[in-house]
Image (cartoon, rainbow, N blue to C red):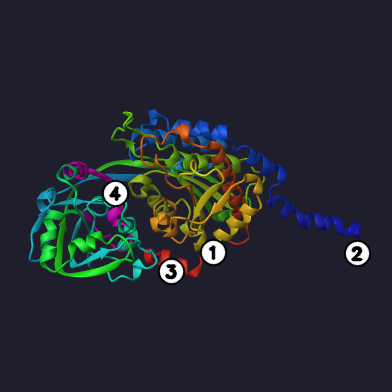
Amino acid sequence: MTFRHCLPVAIVLLAPAALSAQSTESTQSAVASIVPADILRQIGIIADDSMRGRATPSPELEKTATYIAAEFRRFGLKPGGDGGSFIQHYALQLSEIDTANSSVSVSGGPTLRFGPDVLPGPGPREAEVSGRVIVLSGGSPDPAALPRLPLAGSVVMILLPADDPMGRNNGLVRNMGVIGAQRPAAILLVSALAEAGWRQTADAVLRPRVSPAWWEARPGPPRAPVLLVREASLRPTLERRGTAFAGLQSATSGPVRATPVDLTVALTLKSKVDRGSGAPNVVGILEGSDPVLKDEYLVFSGHMDHLGVGQPDARGDSIYNGADDDASGTIAVVELAMAFAKLEPKPKRSLIFLTVSGEERGLWGSDYFANHPPVPIGQIVADLNTDMVGRNWKDTIVVIGKEHSDLGATLNRVNRAHPELRMTAIDDIWPNEDFYSRSDHFNFARKGVPILFFFNGTHADYHRPSDEVSKIDVEKESRIVKLAFYLGLDLANAKDRPKWKPDSYKRVVEPAGR
C-alpha cells in the first residue's frame, strides 16, 4: 500500500487523539489568563472589611458564596449544588452544655462541675463514658508512633505546663486527631490556667455553640469528647494515687510516654440542642471531553471562611480578614476555574471547582461535601487543595501529602517541566505539626481520594486581624496557581488515575472505615 493510500486512514486514526489534547496555543492562553492583578482584585473583594471576616455562619459568608457562584456561572461551568444551583447548603444546629446534668466523676476523688472545674473542648457534646486514666507526656510526638500506644477505652490526660496552659505549643495537643483515632473514651487537658483566664475561657465555650447538624449521626467510630480540666481540681487526687504530676507535666521533650494511673473517670456530658441556620459550599463542574474519562473527576478545593469579628488587636482592628487564610486559596480555585474553562478542547476528565465553608470550625464544609458529593466519591480521582498560598518564600511552596501517593512523583515531574515558573514544590517541612489533617483535603483522603495540599506555612499574621490583603504576594501566588493548573491538566488527561501507596492507604484510609 502506498503512502498516498495510507494518508486518509492515518488522518482518521489521529483525529480522536488530536481532539482530546489541548493545543499549545490553547494551553498558553489559559495560563496567561492567570495574572497577579486579577488575583489581587478578587482577594480584595472577599477579604475586604465589608466581608467582616467571613465567619461560618454569617451573611458575609453567604455573600462570598454568591459572588463565587456568579463567577463560576460566568465561566460557563455547570452547577453542582442543590436544586440545579451552584450552592450546596448544609444544616447547622445551636447547642449548649446542660451544666446541671453534666459532670466528671473521679474514683476516690471529687465530682467535677462544668463551669468551675471543667469546660468542654472540641468534639461531641453528648457522651456517657468511663475509663481508666492514662497520662501522656513527652514533647516530640511521632504521628506514626502514636497509633502504637494502648489508648483504646482509656481516659487520656495531657498535663499542660504552666507556661502553656491552653496547649497552643504542645505537640500532643497538635496531634489530638491522631490520639483520638486510637478510640480513647475521652481526652482531658489538665490546665493551670489562672482564675481570670479560666473565667474568660468559660464565658466563651459555655455560650451556645454552632455545629453541623449531621455530626452526631455520622458513620464511623464515635469520637472522643475533649475537656479542659482545672489543675487544682484534679492534681491532689492524681498525686495521692502516686502520679509524679510535676515530672510528667514538665516532660516536654523526648518521645511520648503513656503512664497508667490507678483511677477511673466517668463522664456524663449532656447538651441542649436547637436547630439553627446553614452554611454554603460552592460547586462548579467543567465536563470532560473524553467519552469514558469524563465520568471521573478531579477536585480543586479551598475554603472561603475565616474567623469573623473578634478580639481587637493593638491597632483596634477587630476584623479577621483572612486574606492569606484562605482568600488566597479560594481565589486560586476561582482562577483555575477561569483558566480551565478557556481550554479547547476541554480536559479528558471532568473537573470540580469547590469552595467550602466551616474549615476554621472543624472542616465542616468539606466533611459535608465528601459525604454528599454531586458524583459518586469513587469517581473522584484526586483533590488538589489550596490553603494559604499568598505569603512567605518567593520561590517555594510546600506541598503536603506527596509521600502518600504517586501524585508526588507526578507533581515533581510537572514542576521540573516548567522552570519558567521559578517555583519549587517541596515536601512537608513541619511533619510534627500534622498539617496533613488540618485542612479540607483530609476529608477527601479519609474517603480514599489521593490528595495534595498546597500551603505556604503560617506567619506572624496567622489568625490575626493583620492578615490583610496588602500583605499578599500576588505575583508569587500567580505562579503557584499556574503550577496547580499544569498539574491538574496532566492529571485530567492521564490514562490512569492516581494511586495510593499501600502503607499510606492503610494508615490514612482504613482507620476512617472507608
Q: What amino acid is at disc 1?
A: Lys
In 3D space, how far apart are the residues under numbered discs 2 and 4 (Cα atoms)? 70 Å
The answer to whether residue 252 is magenta is: no
Q: Secondary structure at mark 3?
A: helix
Q: Is residue 380 visible?
A: yes
Q: Are marks 3 and 1 in contact (CB under 8 Å)?
A: no
Of callouts 4 and 1, the N-terminal one: 4
Q: What amino acid is at disc 4?
A: Ala
Judging by the rendered image, the residue that carries numbered circle 3 is 506
Range of residues picked out in magenta: 199-227
Of callouts 3 and 1, the N-terminal one: 1
Q: Position of residue 479 (x, y in %)?
A: 58, 43
Pointer 1 local density, CA inside 10 Å: few below 14, some 14–19, many at least 20: some
In 3D space, how far apart are the residues under numbered discs 2 and 3 (Cα atoms)? 56 Å
Q: Which mark is residue 213?
A: 4
Instruction: Kindly identify the residue that appears in the image at 7 percent across and 66 percent down.
Output: 108
Q: Position of residue 167 (x, y in %)?
A: 28, 52
Q: What amino acid is at disc 3?
A: Lys
In 3D space, how far apart are the residues under numbered discs 4 and 1 (Cα atoms)? 33 Å
Q: Which mark is residue 344?
A: none
Which circle, 2 or 4, is nearer the viewer? 4
Q: Secondary structure at mark 4?
A: loop
Q: Position of residue 470 (x, y in %)?
A: 47, 31
Q: Nearer the viewer, residue 447 or 190?
A: 190
Judging by the rendered image, the residue that carries numbered circle 1 is 499
